[in-house]
């Protein structure tokens, strides 16, 4: 994996996202959803931040340290109405 660029949450809205799934296996996709749901719970109850690693449409990898407010069917919602497509998220720490 290439080196990730750290980005502020407010700058995510300037990025474009592809339509392709960034993970390879169904197990990775299921684990990502589980980790996102745990992150949502931690964010809502304890205001705990997580590190999201995601890919933009040009293939660049980014990292953001933020609180996950909601996990939908296709997007995660961050504070300030910022969204990231779930299929673009590589890792949650």
Image: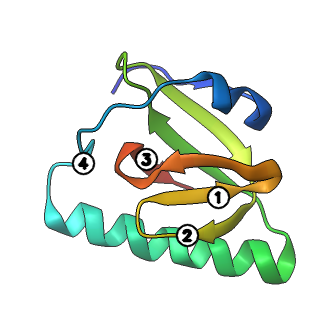
Q: CA distance from mark 4 to mark 2?
A: 18 Å
- Which of the two labelled residues, at mark 1 and mark 4, occupies the earlier sequence position? 4
Q: Residue at x 54, y 28 (%)?
A: 62
Determine the secondary structure under disc 4: loop
Q: Which residue is mark 2?
A: 71
Determine the secondary structure under disc 1: strand
- Which of the two labelled residues, at mark 4 and mark 2, occupies the earlier sequence position? 4
Q: Nearer the viewer, mark 2 or mark 3?
A: 2
Q: CA distance from mark 2 to mark 1?
A: 6 Å
Q: Residues within 10 Å of mark 1 (few under 14, many from 20)?
A: some
Q: Depth check: give the residue in front, 75 or 4.
A: 75
- Which of the two labelled residues, at mark 2 and mark 3, occupies the earlier sequence position? 2
Q: Residue at x 37, y 15 (%)?
A: 58
On the rendered structure, is 8 left or right of 87? Answer: right
- Which of the two labelled residues, at mark 3 and mark 1, occupies the earlier sequence position? 1
Q: Nearer the viewer, mark 1 or mark 4?
A: 1
Q: CA distance from mark 4 to mark 3?
A: 8 Å
Q: Which residue is mark 3?
A: 89
On the rendered structure, is 17 left or right of 53? Answer: left
- Which of the two labelled residues, at mark 4 and mark 3, occupies the earlier sequence position? 4
Q: CA distance from mark 3 to mark 1?
A: 12 Å
Tally the marks: 4
Q: Which residue is mark 1?
A: 77
Residue 56 in percent (x, y) is at: 43, 27
Q: Residues within 10 Å of mark 4 (few under 14, many from 20)?
A: some
Q: Which residue is mark 4?
A: 23
Residue 74 in percent (x, y) is at: 41, 60
């Amino acid at each position: 994996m290439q080196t990730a660029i750290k980005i502020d949450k407010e700058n995510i809205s300037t990025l474009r996202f592809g339509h392709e799934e960034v993970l390879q296996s169904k197990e990775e996709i299921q684990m990502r959803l589980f980790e996102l749901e745990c992150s949502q719970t931690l964010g809502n109850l304890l205001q705990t931040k997580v590190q999201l690693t995601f890919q933009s449409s040009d293939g660049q990898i980014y990292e953001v340290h933020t609180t996950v407010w909601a996990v939908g069917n296709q997007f995660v919602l961050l504070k300030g109405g910022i969204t990231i497509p779930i299929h673009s998220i590589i890792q949650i720490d």
